[in-house]
Image (spheres, rainbow, N blue to C red):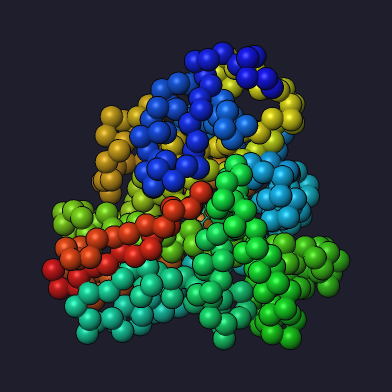
Amino acid sequence: MTESAVPAAISTQVDLFDDAVVADPYPTYAELRALGPVVRLERAQAWGVPRYESAKAVLADPETFSSVNGLHLNPEGNQWVTANSVLATDGLEHARLRRVLSKELAPRAIKDLAESLRSRADELVAGLADRESFDVVSDLAAPYVTGVIMDLMGLPQVDGSGLMKQIESVFDTFAAPNQRTYAGLPSAQAMFEFLQTVCTRDNVRPDSWLGAAHAAADRGEIAEIECVMTMAAYLTAGMDTTIHAIATAVHHLVADREQWELVRDGKVGYDALFGETLRFDAPIQGFGRRVVRETQIGDVTIPAGDQVWVMFGSSGRDADKWGADADRFDVRRPGTEDHLALGFGAHLCAGNHLALMEFDAIFAALGKHFPELSADPEAPAERVLNNVLRVWEKVPVRTRG
Ligand code: HEM
Protein backbone atom coordinates (compact mmCIF):
# COMPACT_ATOMS: atom_id res chain seq x y z
CA MET A 1 0.00 0.00 0.00
CA THR A 2 1.56 3.33 -1.03
CA GLU A 3 1.20 6.36 1.22
CA SER A 4 -0.52 8.42 -1.50
CA ALA A 5 -3.25 5.79 -1.93
CA VAL A 6 -4.42 6.36 1.65
CA PRO A 7 -6.70 9.36 2.34
CA ALA A 8 -4.89 11.78 4.69
CA ALA A 9 -7.75 11.78 7.22
CA ILE A 10 -7.08 8.17 8.18
CA SER A 11 -3.31 8.23 8.08
CA THR A 12 -1.03 9.22 10.94
CA GLN A 13 2.69 9.52 11.62
CA VAL A 14 2.14 8.79 15.34
CA ASP A 15 4.63 6.21 16.64
CA LEU A 16 2.65 4.01 19.02
CA PHE A 17 5.86 2.50 20.43
CA ASP A 18 7.67 5.78 21.12
CA ASP A 19 8.77 6.24 24.78
CA ALA A 20 6.38 9.12 25.44
CA VAL A 21 3.39 7.27 23.97
CA VAL A 22 4.20 4.02 25.77
CA ALA A 23 4.53 5.93 29.07
CA ASP A 24 0.93 7.18 28.73
CA PRO A 25 -0.76 5.90 25.58
CA TYR A 26 -4.32 6.99 26.36
CA PRO A 27 -4.27 10.58 24.97
CA THR A 28 -2.84 9.20 21.70
CA TYR A 29 -5.51 6.49 21.60
CA ALA A 30 -8.22 9.15 21.96
CA GLU A 31 -6.80 10.97 18.92
CA LEU A 32 -6.76 7.76 16.89
CA ARG A 33 -10.31 6.80 17.87
CA ALA A 34 -11.46 10.25 16.72
CA LEU A 35 -9.92 9.60 13.29
CA GLY A 36 -12.01 6.51 12.60
CA PRO A 37 -12.55 2.79 13.18
CA VAL A 38 -9.27 2.10 11.42
CA VAL A 39 -6.21 4.36 11.01
CA ARG A 40 -3.12 3.84 8.89
CA LEU A 41 -0.09 3.85 11.22
CA GLU A 42 2.55 4.92 8.71
CA ARG A 43 5.49 4.40 11.08
CA ALA A 44 4.44 0.84 11.94
CA GLN A 45 3.33 0.01 8.40
CA ALA A 46 0.11 -1.39 9.81
CA TRP A 47 -3.54 -0.45 10.33
CA GLY A 48 -4.43 0.55 13.88
CA VAL A 49 -7.88 -0.56 15.08
CA PRO A 50 -8.54 1.76 18.03
CA ARG A 51 -12.32 1.64 18.60
CA TYR A 52 -14.13 -0.98 20.67
CA GLU A 53 -16.54 -2.13 17.94
CA SER A 54 -13.93 -2.30 15.18
CA ALA A 55 -11.44 -4.16 17.41
CA LYS A 56 -14.12 -6.68 18.41
CA ALA A 57 -15.13 -7.20 14.76
CA VAL A 58 -11.52 -7.97 13.81
CA LEU A 59 -11.14 -10.48 16.66
CA ALA A 60 -14.45 -12.12 15.70
CA ASP A 61 -13.29 -12.80 12.12
CA PRO A 62 -10.15 -14.97 12.16
CA GLU A 63 -10.85 -16.11 8.60
CA THR A 64 -10.06 -12.60 7.38
CA PHE A 65 -7.74 -11.48 10.17
CA SER A 66 -5.32 -14.35 10.67
CA SER A 67 -3.03 -14.94 13.63
CA VAL A 68 -0.54 -16.76 11.40
CA ASN A 69 2.49 -14.60 10.66
CA GLY A 70 0.57 -11.63 11.99
CA LEU A 71 0.84 -11.18 15.76
CA HIS A 72 4.11 -9.21 15.70
CA LEU A 73 4.62 -6.10 13.58
CA ASN A 74 8.07 -7.36 12.51
CA PRO A 75 9.15 -10.51 10.63
CA GLU A 76 11.62 -11.79 13.26
CA GLY A 77 8.96 -11.91 15.96
CA ASN A 78 6.51 -13.73 13.70
CA GLN A 79 9.16 -16.22 12.57
CA TRP A 80 10.98 -16.89 15.84
CA VAL A 81 8.88 -16.00 18.84
CA THR A 82 5.32 -17.26 18.40
CA ALA A 83 5.34 -19.18 15.09
CA ASN A 84 3.37 -22.46 15.26
CA SER A 85 2.16 -21.78 18.81
CA VAL A 86 -1.49 -21.79 19.90
CA LEU A 87 -1.41 -17.98 19.72
CA ALA A 88 -0.19 -17.86 16.12
CA THR A 89 -2.29 -20.54 14.42
CA ASP A 90 -5.81 -20.56 12.95
CA GLY A 91 -8.63 -23.03 12.42
CA LEU A 92 -8.03 -26.75 12.95
CA GLU A 93 -4.34 -26.29 13.73
CA HIS A 94 -5.26 -23.82 16.46
CA ALA A 95 -7.98 -26.12 17.84
CA ARG A 96 -5.51 -29.03 18.00
CA LEU A 97 -2.99 -27.00 20.02
CA ARG A 98 -5.61 -25.36 22.24
CA ARG A 99 -6.96 -28.81 23.21
CA VAL A 100 -3.64 -29.76 24.86
CA LEU A 101 -4.44 -27.86 28.07
CA SER A 102 -8.19 -27.30 27.67
CA LYS A 103 -9.04 -29.77 30.46
CA GLU A 104 -6.54 -28.23 32.90
CA LEU A 105 -7.81 -24.68 32.28
CA ALA A 106 -11.54 -25.37 32.10
CA PRO A 107 -13.68 -23.46 34.66
CA ARG A 108 -14.36 -26.65 36.65
CA ALA A 109 -10.66 -27.54 36.96
CA ILE A 110 -9.84 -24.00 38.02
CA LYS A 111 -12.67 -24.00 40.56
CA ASP A 112 -11.09 -27.08 42.11
CA LEU A 113 -7.92 -25.02 42.58
CA ALA A 114 -9.72 -22.19 44.37
CA GLU A 115 -8.96 -23.42 47.87
CA SER A 116 -5.23 -23.87 47.26
CA LEU A 117 -4.97 -20.55 45.39
CA ARG A 118 -6.61 -18.81 48.35
CA SER A 119 -4.48 -20.44 51.01
CA ARG A 120 -1.30 -19.69 49.06
CA ALA A 121 -2.30 -16.01 48.82
CA ASP A 122 -3.34 -15.90 52.46
CA GLU A 123 -0.01 -17.29 53.59
CA LEU A 124 1.95 -14.83 51.47
CA VAL A 125 -0.06 -11.80 52.63
CA ALA A 126 0.02 -12.95 56.27
CA GLY A 127 3.81 -13.08 55.94
CA LEU A 128 3.79 -9.31 55.25
CA ALA A 129 1.70 -8.53 58.34
CA ASP A 130 4.64 -7.19 60.40
CA ARG A 131 5.59 -4.70 57.71
CA GLU A 132 4.47 -1.06 57.64
CA SER A 133 4.80 -0.97 53.89
CA PHE A 134 5.55 -3.32 51.01
CA ASP A 135 5.83 -3.34 47.23
CA VAL A 136 2.83 -4.97 45.54
CA VAL A 137 4.95 -6.08 42.57
CA SER A 138 8.04 -7.66 44.12
CA ASP A 139 6.64 -8.66 47.53
CA LEU A 140 3.23 -9.93 46.48
CA ALA A 141 2.04 -10.22 42.87
CA ALA A 142 5.28 -11.55 41.34
CA PRO A 143 6.05 -14.23 43.95
CA TYR A 144 2.39 -15.25 44.06
CA VAL A 145 1.77 -15.57 40.32
CA THR A 146 5.17 -17.09 39.46
CA GLY A 147 4.72 -19.59 42.30
CA VAL A 148 1.25 -20.57 41.09
CA ILE A 149 2.34 -20.91 37.46
CA MET A 150 5.54 -22.86 38.23
CA ASP A 151 3.49 -25.20 40.39
CA LEU A 152 0.82 -25.72 37.73
CA MET A 153 3.48 -26.24 35.09
CA GLY A 154 4.89 -29.01 37.26
CA LEU A 155 8.07 -27.22 38.38
CA PRO A 156 7.38 -26.28 42.01
CA GLN A 157 11.09 -26.19 42.83
CA VAL A 158 11.93 -23.60 40.14
CA ASP A 159 12.12 -19.89 41.03
CA GLY A 160 10.20 -18.07 38.30
CA SER A 161 11.46 -14.56 39.11
CA GLY A 162 14.18 -14.57 36.41
CA LEU A 163 11.68 -15.80 33.85
CA MET A 164 9.35 -12.94 34.72
CA LYS A 165 11.85 -10.32 33.49
CA GLN A 166 12.56 -12.35 30.35
CA ILE A 167 8.87 -12.65 29.54
CA GLU A 168 8.45 -8.92 30.06
CA SER A 169 10.86 -8.28 27.22
CA VAL A 170 9.29 -11.00 25.03
CA PHE A 171 6.27 -8.63 24.94
CA ASP A 172 8.50 -5.93 23.41
CA THR A 173 8.97 -8.16 20.35
CA PHE A 174 5.33 -7.78 19.25
CA ALA A 175 5.82 -4.14 18.25
CA ALA A 176 7.05 -2.46 15.08
CA PRO A 177 10.86 -2.42 15.01
CA ASN A 178 12.57 -0.25 17.61
CA GLN A 179 15.39 -0.77 20.10
CA ARG A 180 13.14 -2.56 22.60
CA THR A 181 11.66 -4.84 19.94
CA TYR A 182 15.05 -6.30 19.06
CA ALA A 183 16.35 -6.35 22.64
CA GLY A 184 13.47 -8.74 23.40
CA LEU A 185 14.53 -11.43 20.91
CA PRO A 186 17.36 -12.89 23.07
CA SER A 187 14.88 -13.10 25.95
CA ALA A 188 12.56 -15.22 23.83
CA GLN A 189 15.55 -17.43 23.01
CA ALA A 190 16.42 -17.76 26.72
CA MET A 191 12.82 -18.75 27.51
CA PHE A 192 12.89 -21.50 24.86
CA GLU A 193 16.22 -22.76 26.25
CA PHE A 194 14.75 -22.87 29.76
CA LEU A 195 11.78 -24.86 28.49
CA GLN A 196 14.01 -27.27 26.55
CA THR A 197 16.59 -27.84 29.26
CA VAL A 198 14.63 -27.57 32.54
CA CYS A 199 11.15 -28.66 31.55
CA THR A 200 12.09 -32.20 30.59
CA ARG A 201 10.01 -35.30 31.34
CA ASP A 202 12.30 -36.12 34.31
CA ASN A 203 11.77 -32.74 35.92
CA VAL A 204 8.02 -32.24 35.77
CA ARG A 205 5.14 -33.79 37.64
CA PRO A 206 2.95 -35.90 35.35
CA ASP A 207 -0.23 -34.30 36.80
CA SER A 208 0.80 -30.85 35.58
CA TRP A 209 0.51 -28.66 32.48
CA LEU A 210 3.90 -29.81 31.22
CA GLY A 211 2.97 -33.38 32.05
CA ALA A 212 -0.21 -32.99 29.97
CA ALA A 213 1.78 -31.52 27.08
CA HIS A 214 4.30 -34.39 27.17
CA ALA A 215 1.44 -36.90 27.31
CA ALA A 216 -0.16 -35.27 24.24
CA ALA A 217 3.20 -35.60 22.45
CA ASP A 218 3.47 -39.26 23.49
CA ARG A 219 -0.01 -39.90 22.05
CA GLY A 220 1.11 -38.27 18.80
CA GLU A 221 -1.38 -35.39 19.12
CA ILE A 222 1.36 -32.79 19.01
CA ALA A 223 4.99 -32.89 17.88
CA GLU A 224 7.78 -32.75 20.47
CA ILE A 225 8.74 -29.21 19.43
CA GLU A 226 5.11 -28.15 19.84
CA CYS A 227 5.39 -28.99 23.56
CA VAL A 228 7.94 -26.22 23.85
CA MET A 229 5.92 -23.79 21.73
CA THR A 230 2.78 -24.57 23.73
CA MET A 231 4.46 -24.00 27.06
CA ALA A 232 6.14 -20.84 25.77
CA ALA A 233 2.72 -19.47 24.85
CA TYR A 234 1.26 -20.30 28.28
CA LEU A 235 4.24 -18.84 30.10
CA THR A 236 4.32 -15.66 28.01
CA ALA A 237 0.59 -15.09 28.23
CA GLY A 238 0.06 -16.17 31.82
CA MET A 239 2.67 -14.64 34.08
CA ASP A 240 3.48 -10.95 33.70
CA THR A 241 -0.05 -10.15 32.47
CA THR A 242 -1.56 -11.23 35.77
CA ILE A 243 1.23 -9.77 37.92
CA HIS A 244 0.80 -6.29 36.46
CA ALA A 245 -3.00 -6.53 36.42
CA ILE A 246 -2.96 -7.18 40.18
CA ALA A 247 -0.58 -4.24 40.68
CA THR A 248 -2.82 -1.98 38.55
CA ALA A 249 -5.88 -2.91 40.60
CA VAL A 250 -4.15 -2.22 43.94
CA HIS A 251 -2.70 1.05 42.61
CA HIS A 252 -6.14 2.40 41.72
CA LEU A 253 -7.92 1.06 44.79
CA VAL A 254 -5.53 2.64 47.27
CA ALA A 255 -5.84 5.95 45.43
CA ASP A 256 -9.57 6.03 46.26
CA ARG A 257 -10.45 4.85 49.76
CA GLU A 258 -14.15 4.52 48.95
CA GLN A 259 -13.44 2.05 46.13
CA TRP A 260 -11.03 0.05 48.31
CA GLU A 261 -13.72 -0.23 51.01
CA LEU A 262 -16.31 -1.43 48.49
CA VAL A 263 -13.98 -4.26 47.43
CA ARG A 264 -12.71 -5.01 50.93
CA ASP A 265 -16.23 -5.21 52.35
CA GLY A 266 -17.52 -7.43 49.55
CA LYS A 267 -19.93 -4.79 48.23
CA VAL A 268 -18.31 -5.11 44.81
CA GLY A 269 -17.27 -8.56 43.61
CA TYR A 270 -13.73 -9.52 42.65
CA ASP A 271 -15.03 -10.25 39.14
CA ALA A 272 -16.17 -6.62 38.81
CA LEU A 273 -12.77 -5.44 40.05
CA PHE A 274 -11.08 -7.75 37.53
CA GLY A 275 -13.25 -6.48 34.66
CA GLU A 276 -12.77 -2.80 35.47
CA THR A 277 -9.01 -3.21 35.92
CA LEU A 278 -8.60 -4.92 32.54
CA ARG A 279 -10.92 -2.47 30.78
CA PHE A 280 -9.17 0.55 32.27
CA ASP A 281 -5.56 -0.48 31.66
CA ALA A 282 -5.29 -3.61 29.50
CA PRO A 283 -2.09 -5.44 30.48
CA ILE A 284 -1.55 -6.33 26.80
CA GLN A 285 -2.14 -3.12 24.87
CA GLY A 286 -2.28 -4.62 21.39
CA PHE A 287 -1.57 -7.62 19.17
CA GLY A 288 -1.41 -7.88 15.39
CA ARG A 289 -3.28 -9.86 12.77
CA ARG A 290 -2.52 -10.56 9.05
CA VAL A 291 -5.27 -9.69 6.55
CA VAL A 292 -5.61 -12.76 4.33
CA ARG A 293 -8.33 -11.46 1.98
CA GLU A 294 -9.22 -7.93 0.97
CA THR A 295 -11.72 -6.49 3.42
CA GLN A 296 -13.41 -3.31 4.63
CA ILE A 297 -13.22 -1.70 8.04
CA GLY A 298 -15.72 1.18 8.01
CA ASP A 299 -15.36 2.61 4.51
CA VAL A 300 -11.65 1.81 4.27
CA THR A 301 -10.49 -1.05 2.05
CA ILE A 302 -7.66 -3.07 3.59
CA PRO A 303 -5.67 -5.10 1.05
CA ALA A 304 -4.75 -8.75 1.58
CA GLY A 305 -1.24 -9.13 3.03
CA ASP A 306 -1.41 -5.99 5.23
CA GLN A 307 -1.30 -6.14 9.01
CA VAL A 308 -3.73 -4.66 11.53
CA TRP A 309 -2.91 -3.79 15.15
CA VAL A 310 -5.83 -4.63 17.46
CA MET A 311 -5.71 -2.01 20.20
CA PHE A 312 -7.05 -3.72 23.34
CA GLY A 313 -5.94 -0.79 25.52
CA SER A 314 -7.69 1.81 23.38
CA SER A 315 -10.89 -0.23 23.10
CA GLY A 316 -11.24 -0.08 26.89
CA ARG A 317 -11.40 3.73 26.84
CA ASP A 318 -13.85 4.12 23.95
CA ALA A 319 -16.58 6.51 25.18
CA ASP A 320 -19.00 5.11 22.56
CA LYS A 321 -18.91 1.85 24.47
CA TRP A 322 -18.13 2.87 28.05
CA GLY A 323 -19.67 6.35 28.31
CA ALA A 324 -18.24 9.83 28.81
CA ASP A 325 -16.36 8.79 31.98
CA ALA A 326 -14.44 5.97 30.26
CA ASP A 327 -11.16 7.49 31.49
CA ARG A 328 -12.23 7.03 35.12
CA PHE A 329 -11.43 3.85 37.11
CA ASP A 330 -14.66 2.84 38.83
CA VAL A 331 -15.31 -0.61 40.27
CA ARG A 332 -19.07 0.19 40.31
CA ARG A 333 -19.18 0.44 36.49
CA PRO A 334 -21.66 -2.13 35.13
CA GLY A 335 -20.91 -4.47 32.23
CA THR A 336 -17.13 -4.42 32.37
CA GLU A 337 -17.00 -8.15 31.53
CA ASP A 338 -17.47 -7.00 27.91
CA HIS A 339 -13.90 -5.63 27.80
CA LEU A 340 -11.56 -6.99 25.12
CA ALA A 341 -8.41 -7.14 27.26
CA LEU A 342 -8.56 -10.95 27.34
CA GLY A 343 -9.20 -11.06 23.59
CA PHE A 344 -12.44 -12.26 22.02
CA GLY A 345 -13.53 -15.20 19.87
CA ALA A 346 -11.28 -18.09 18.89
CA HIS A 347 -8.19 -16.80 20.71
CA LEU A 348 -10.00 -15.63 23.87
CA CYS A 349 -7.51 -15.97 26.73
CA ALA A 350 -7.19 -19.62 27.70
CA GLY A 351 -6.19 -18.60 31.23
CA ASN A 352 -9.03 -16.18 31.93
CA HIS A 353 -10.62 -18.30 34.70
CA LEU A 354 -7.26 -18.83 36.35
CA ALA A 355 -6.41 -15.11 36.23
CA LEU A 356 -9.75 -14.27 37.86
CA MET A 357 -9.20 -16.87 40.60
CA GLU A 358 -5.75 -15.41 41.29
CA PHE A 359 -7.38 -11.97 41.65
CA ASP A 360 -10.01 -13.44 43.95
CA ALA A 361 -7.35 -15.05 46.15
CA ILE A 362 -5.11 -11.98 46.39
CA PHE A 363 -7.87 -9.47 47.14
CA ALA A 364 -9.56 -11.75 49.68
CA ALA A 365 -6.22 -11.99 51.52
CA LEU A 366 -5.48 -8.26 51.29
CA GLY A 367 -8.95 -7.37 52.60
CA LYS A 368 -8.56 -9.78 55.52
CA HIS A 369 -5.04 -8.85 56.63
CA PHE A 370 -4.78 -5.18 55.58
CA PRO A 371 -8.20 -3.50 55.90
CA GLU A 372 -6.51 -0.09 56.08
CA LEU A 373 -4.33 -0.55 53.00
CA SER A 374 -3.32 2.81 51.49
CA ALA A 375 -0.91 4.39 49.02
CA ASP A 376 2.60 5.12 50.33
CA PRO A 377 2.88 8.94 50.13
CA GLU A 378 6.68 8.77 50.34
CA ALA A 379 7.16 6.27 47.52
CA PRO A 380 5.19 6.84 44.32
CA ALA A 381 4.41 3.92 42.01
CA GLU A 382 6.79 3.60 39.06
CA ARG A 383 6.50 1.99 35.66
CA VAL A 384 8.96 0.39 33.23
CA LEU A 385 8.53 1.23 29.55
CA ASN A 386 7.48 -1.73 27.43
CA ASN A 387 6.24 -1.69 23.83
CA VAL A 388 3.11 -3.71 24.52
CA LEU A 389 2.78 -4.71 28.18
CA ARG A 390 1.77 -2.24 30.92
CA VAL A 391 4.61 -2.95 33.34
CA TRP A 392 5.00 -1.70 36.91
CA GLU A 393 8.47 -1.41 38.42
CA LYS A 394 6.94 -0.95 41.87
CA VAL A 395 3.65 -0.12 43.56
CA PRO A 396 4.49 0.69 47.20
CA VAL A 397 1.63 0.57 49.73
CA ARG A 398 1.24 1.18 53.46
CA THR A 399 -0.37 -1.53 55.50
CA ARG A 400 -1.87 0.56 58.31
CA GLY A 401 -3.36 3.59 56.57
C1 HEM B 1 -4.93 -10.64 33.50
C2 HEM B 1 -4.24 -11.60 32.94
C3 HEM B 1 -4.27 -11.92 31.46
C4 HEM B 1 -4.45 -11.11 30.38
C5 HEM B 1 -4.71 -9.61 30.38
C6 HEM B 1 -4.40 -11.93 29.20
C7 HEM B 1 -4.59 -11.47 27.90
C8 HEM B 1 -4.74 -12.29 26.80
C9 HEM B 1 -5.12 -11.86 25.49
C10 HEM B 1 -5.41 -10.41 25.09
C11 HEM B 1 -5.17 -12.93 24.69
C12 HEM B 1 -5.65 -12.98 23.23
C13 HEM B 1 -4.53 -13.03 22.23
C14 HEM B 1 -5.03 -12.86 20.81
O1 HEM B 1 -6.21 -12.62 20.56
O2 HEM B 1 -4.17 -12.94 19.91
C15 HEM B 1 -4.78 -14.06 25.49
C16 HEM B 1 -4.65 -15.35 25.02
C17 HEM B 1 -4.08 -16.37 25.75
N1 HEM B 1 -3.85 -16.38 27.12
FE1 HEM B 1 -4.15 -14.85 28.37
N2 HEM B 1 -4.15 -13.22 29.60
C18 HEM B 1 -4.06 -13.26 30.96
C19 HEM B 1 -3.83 -14.37 31.75
C20 HEM B 1 -3.53 -15.62 31.26
C21 HEM B 1 -3.20 -16.78 32.06
C22 HEM B 1 -3.18 -16.81 33.59
C23 HEM B 1 -2.92 -17.79 31.19
C24 HEM B 1 -2.57 -19.21 31.48
C25 HEM B 1 -1.63 -19.61 32.13
C26 HEM B 1 -3.09 -17.29 29.85
C27 HEM B 1 -2.91 -18.01 28.70
C28 HEM B 1 -3.29 -17.58 27.44
C29 HEM B 1 -3.17 -18.39 26.25
C30 HEM B 1 -2.61 -19.80 26.17
C31 HEM B 1 -3.67 -17.62 25.19
C32 HEM B 1 -3.75 -18.01 23.73
C33 HEM B 1 -5.14 -18.54 23.43
C34 HEM B 1 -5.30 -18.87 21.99
O3 HEM B 1 -4.57 -18.38 21.13
O4 HEM B 1 -6.23 -19.66 21.70
N3 HEM B 1 -3.46 -15.97 29.94
N4 HEM B 1 -4.54 -13.64 26.78
Q: Quadrant of residue 80?
A: bottom right
- Location of the C terminus (image quadrant): bottom left
Q: Residue furthest right?
A: 220
Image point (50%, 36%), residue name: 15
Q: Quadrant of residue 235?
A: bottom right
The image shows residue 86 at horizontal and vertical percentages of: 69, 54
Number of labelled discs?
A: 0
* Ligand 1 shown in quarter: bottom right
Q: Quadrant of residue 166?
A: bottom right
In the rendered structure, the answer to whether residue 372 lies left or right of residue 159 reads left
Q: Is residue 346 visible?
A: no
Q: Is residue 278 visible?
A: yes
In the rendered structure, the answer to whether residue 133 lies left or right of residue 276 reads left
- Location of the N terminus (image quadrant): top right
Image point (31%, 36%), residue name: 326
Q: Which of the pair 153/264 is nearer the observer?
A: 153
Q: Which of the pair 8/129 is nearer the observer?
A: 8
Q: Which of the pair 219/66 is nearer the observer?
A: 66
The image shows residue 193 at horizontal and vertical percentages of: 70, 72
Image point (47%, 70%), residue name: 145
Image point (48%, 53%), residue name: 386
The image shows residue 276 at horizontal and vertical percentages of: 35, 48
The image shows residue 161 at horizontal and vertical percentages of: 50, 75
